[in-house]
Amino acid sequence: MIQATRETNFTAYIETRANRIANVGDARIRHLVKFINDLDEAVFYAYPLLENIHPRYTSMPFIYNVSPEMYEGQLNLIPAGYFKYEVYEVSWISEDVQLAAATAPATETDVLPVADENGVVEGLVAIGKLYLGEKSGSEEVQYTEYDQPASTNTIYYGQ
């Protein structure tokens, strides 16, 4: 599980190498991350800007920005709470990987024209949960304490 705080930068450490699909070098691999809000099923996509593939995990830093930019790792995940995440492996033939709308798939089903400089989604390599805590305020579910009921056939949660 990834834990992060809303309106702040965070780094996800996810094992992706054990499920590697494409037989290309690390320099030709990027990961498209899909975040799905558990509450309203809103979907957010992003490529981490600086991705470091290690032998046992991949570190993926994401940057908070009010105006998200998926190709630069900038997110504005709302509301706070639980998200599912899915990580898709994207590979390139060219050594010069460019993360842009014309050369990198925007979703896991996006297919770009065949070209050495265009990425291809190879498949799903990791899934998990993200808990996004609230930075401040009252955005998360609020519980209200009610007075004890007069009748005795109810369940009472009070002080």
Image (cartoon, grey):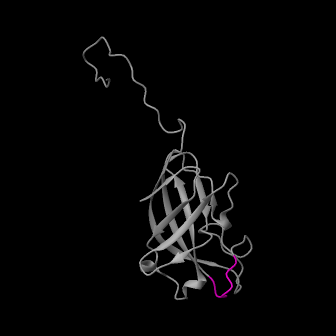
Tally the numbered discs. 0
Q: In the displayed structure, would residue 20 be above or below residue 38?
A: below
Range covered by the magenta-colored residues: 92-98
Between residues 47 and 108, which one lies in front from this camera angle? 47
Q: Let me know if residue 95 is in the magenta part.
A: yes
Residue shown at 50% from the left, 39% from the top: 140
Where, quadrant-wise, is the C terminus in this rendering? top left
Residue sitting at 46 percent across and 75 percent down? 16
Where residue 129 sits in the image (x, y, percent)?
44, 58
Q: Give the image quarter of residue 73.
A: bottom right
Of 65 and 84, the residue lying toward us: 65
The x and y percentages for residue 11 are 52, 64
Residue 69, percent across and down? Answer: 69, 61
| In the displayed structure image, the side of residue 117 where residue 20 appears, left or right | left
Q: Residue at x 52, y 46 (%)?
A: 80
Q: Quadrant of residue 72?
A: bottom right
Front residue of 14/109: it is 14
Q: Nearer the viewer, residue 30 or 59?
A: 59
